[in-house]
Amino acid sequence: MLQLFKFKGGVKPESHKQESANLPIRSAPLPTRVIIPLRLNSLTTATPTVAIGDAVSKGQCIATAEGRMSTGIHASTSGHVVAIEDAAFPHPSGFSARSVIIAPDGEDRWCELMPFDETNPDPQALREFLRNAGIVGLGGAGFPSHVKLSPGQARVDTLIINGAECEPWITCDDRLMRERATAIIAGARIMRRAVGAQRIIVGIEDNKPEAVAAMQAAAAAEEATGGEAAIRVVAVPTRYPAGGEKQLIRVLTGIEIPFGKLGFHYGVQCFNVGTAYAVHRAVAFGEPLVNRVVTLTGNVETAGNWEIPIGMPIDEFIALGKPKADTDRFLMGGPMMGFSLPGTDAPLIKTSNCIIAGSPKLFPPPAPEMPCIRCGECAKACPIELQPFELYWHTRAKTFGKTQEYHIFDCIECGCCSFVCPSRIPLVQYFRFAKSEIWAREKEKNAADQAKARFEWKTARDEREKAEKAEKLAKAAAAQAAKKAAEAAAAAAAPVDGTTSATPPPAAAEAAAPVDADAARKAAIAAAMERARAQREAATPKNTDQLTPAQQREIAAVDALRQQAGIEPVPATPATEEPKS
């Protein structure tokens, strides 16, 4: 038996799983339009490869990856591209994102699919294939799977498949494990080969006995058919957030991942069961990630799980459950880590796992926020062992540097602190605000540093150009002075009878010698003084030859005044003799 461990903190909210877990997965009908964002999160974007009016098939690549953290994006049904424009994005801010909008033709026709050759022993080829297939984490974060499958120099011994699904109300992973356990185990086997792991552990909360039984049967069948090393399916105690990556690693292996570290640093890598299923479909059948299972629950007449095409508008998906009249809002994700949608015109994306219809009865308005009493309950419940009350006070004071000292970026925003707070303080909202402020200030600082670097580079370039120009002028002046000196020496040494001397004169020899830097500088100064003298001569009046006696007397008077003041008199034009009367 595998020994299980405990993680600190955590809470036990009401699960509300039964509302949607008892019905099988249903296929959603084709929507009237499909909106596929070119951006999955702040780290990933893609470049469209289609144009307005193009006909596309299901599974066709419509955007190529940009950068290492991006993946390919594919059409989730066949039809025509009607627009490539900014459209609503499922985010609490309500911002828009560049999207490809497709009008389905109703045929849902696949393009030609190319499965991966499983006999290919190159893990890098497999990772590149999954990247082009658009495979990302389906547990909520949407992290590119090809990156997590590239541990680099680290050695991964244990591959964990996360089927905990600890968030209340959500049951999409539960139904996926019950109905498609064999495909999930096959996907886990493929990922094990990509990272070189020695063992696979599947962790499922013990409030899902049907899923545990189905996965154990699939693992046993894999072993019976001559599969690789044993795959262990383990039921873990139900405690939120046991589905957090670090918490599940702690429960299953006893390894505690410290601040600033990830699982692969300790030989462990973790993937969601939905991701494993998507990997199997991509490798075995060549299907890119264009569908996913989404839970629709809450204040609806028909709760359940539907397999939807990526990009299906949320309002059309909600209509499948027939919301009740008193529905006042919709949440994406669970009540602990999810958020209220600002509108329902946004599409379902790869990370959309649940839509909850809310009502005043299901989710009463929050009680008024009261002052923090520093009771410490939030610290006791924190599964990361942070001090939320300290983070709260520093966030209120906007001393964001202090929040970083208290490891605010290690907060997984699970909501345990807010759940237990007797003062009803929405602590997670404060922490999200602090993180966004720190990111914004870092961005401004980086922009300022780049501007400073550009200014310093331009200043250095200008100084270098000035020095080079001065050096060229000095060399030119020195060469001109040397030439004149050589010419003068040659003229002085020439014999009177016109014959040439076999030995060059000393002056000419000195002129032919290399000119050092000091001499060049002096020559440049002399040349500049000569130019100034020539300019003064050019500016001297030339109409002083025919002065009248009166003008001559005025000049003489000025010269006298200049002499009395101690100023060197300007040479005066010789006066003509005054005529006798």
Image: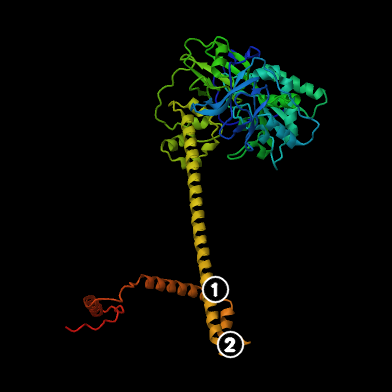
In the image, residue 495 above or below residue 77: below
Give percent across and percent down for residue 16.
56, 16
534 sits to left or right of 166 = left
Left or right: 295 as drawn, with respect to 546: right
Viewer-proximal residue, 26 or 389? 26
Task: Tell which residue pokes out farthest to the right in this image.
Answer: 226
**Image quadrant in which you'd find residue 567:** bottom left
Using the rendered view, name the quadrant where residue 176 is placed: top right
Disc 2 target residue: 498
| x 49%, y 26%: residue | 94
Q: Report x, y in % for residue 516.
A: 55, 75
Secondary structure of the residue carrying numbered label 2: loop
Residue reaching furthest to the front: 581
Q: Which amino acid, mark 1?
A: Ala
Could you say where residue 399 lies in the image, as x and y percent from the top left? Answer: 43, 41
Front-most of 28 and 340? 28
Identify the residue shown where x is 50% and y is 32%. Answer: 379
Identify the residue at image location x=49%, y=62%. 466
Which residue has dot 1 on it?
479
Point out the tag, 2 or 1, that comes first from the N-terminus: 1
Judge the density around disc 2: few (<14), some (14-19), many (≥20) Cα neighbours within 10 Å: few
Up the image or down, 335 lies above or below 384; here it is above
In space, the residues marked 2 and 1 are separated at their CA atoms by 28 Å
Q: Which kind of residue does numbered mark 2 sit on? A: Gly
